[in-house]
Image: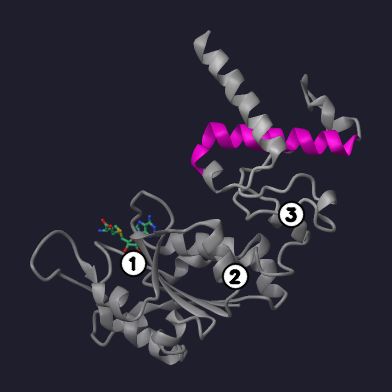
Amino acid sequence: MKADILTIFPGFFTGPLDHGITRRACEMGLANIEVHDLRQFTHDRHRTVDDRPFGGGEGMVLKPEPIFDCLEPLQLAPREQRLAGAAKESVILLSAQGERFTQNIAGELAKLDRIVLICGRYEGVDERVADFIADRELSIGDYVLSGGELGAAVIVEAVMRLLPGAVGNEASTRQESFSPHVDLEAPGAADSTCGSGGLLDYPHYTRPADFRGMTVPEVLLNGDHQQIRKWRREQALEKTLRNRPDLLQGVKLSDEDAKILAKIERSQRLTTND
Ligand code: SAM
């Protein structure tokens, strides 16, 4: 996969993407990240990338020319083809007004050959970028950042760790928080603990079993895999209900899950009534 990042602060990316799985994916030849400095696509002495908004108002707006000019030599497929899914490429504008970036979108992007990420700054980007060259606008959350660079780094990392071969143990990405449903009856799935199936992940522990008097739950030490699987599923359901109840609507619950959830809800009601 190729990732092109368009920014007025190219130095920003020296560091965040040079570690861990993104670095590994690049070294293994699974990914290639190229950062493009938008100021190199300006045509004036001051290398101006922004201007005042038409109609008045606060702040400055990123001009369209450097963005269009930077994209041209990248020789992407025409936008209509990209939007129709006929080209495995996507041009993404980072924007607080965009669709919320999720694990599902990361999964969709990981199937492409190329993603292009346009980082905004100031009050935002001239709207013609969203209207005529970007395929989608993505937001990394309901808050306003000063620029799209952190968002681009977040997307690159989330996508690249899903590239086949990027993470040493691929089963681990299938059972992480938010991962789509895992068929627990499928071959190999039985070894993969409980599989997230859209829930938040279950708690993890490692040695020592007793750390300063804080002990690991007994069930994880007894080697009974059926019990461990059940406990993990229960923990994942409990944590999801507590922190992200909205996620439960998209989860395929088994009869056993429904019973566990009802039990957790009953005990929560009892605690609240006490
Ligand atoms: N005026 C814009 C608004 O109210 O929606 C905010 C502009 S923000 C200060 C500057 C740039 O930061 C945006 O163009 C976008 O690229 C980036 N940005 C800010 N918040 C973001 C978010 N939640 N997700 C992705 N990018 C964001």
- Disc 1 under 8 Å from ligand 1? The reply is yes
Q: Give the vertical position of 204 relative to 171 (above or below).
A: above
Give the class, few, some or many, for how many residues have Cα within 10 Å of label 1's Cα (few <14, many ≥20). many
Of pointers 2 and 1, the one earlier in the residue sequence = 2
CB at disc 3 and ligand 1 closer than 8 Å:
no
The residue beneath circle 2 is: 110
Return the residue at label 3: 183
For marks 1 and 3, give the CA distance.
40 Å
Secondary structure beneath disc 2?
helix
Chain part drawn in magenta: 224-246
Q: Looking at the image, which residue is at 55% across and 42% down?
A: 248
- Comparing 213 with 220, the one in front is 220
Tell me where residue 18 appears, x and y as whole percent: 61, 65
For the residues carrying marks 3 and 2, which lies nearer the camera in this image? 3
Assign the magenta stretch its main secondary structure: helix
Spatial distance from mark 3 to mark 2, Cα to Cα? 21 Å
Find residue 226 and name its label.
Answer: none
214 left or right, relative to 40: right
250 in magenta:
no
Q: Nearer the viewer, mark 2 or mark 1?
A: 2
Residue drawn at (84%, 58%) of the image: 187
Residue under label 1: 120
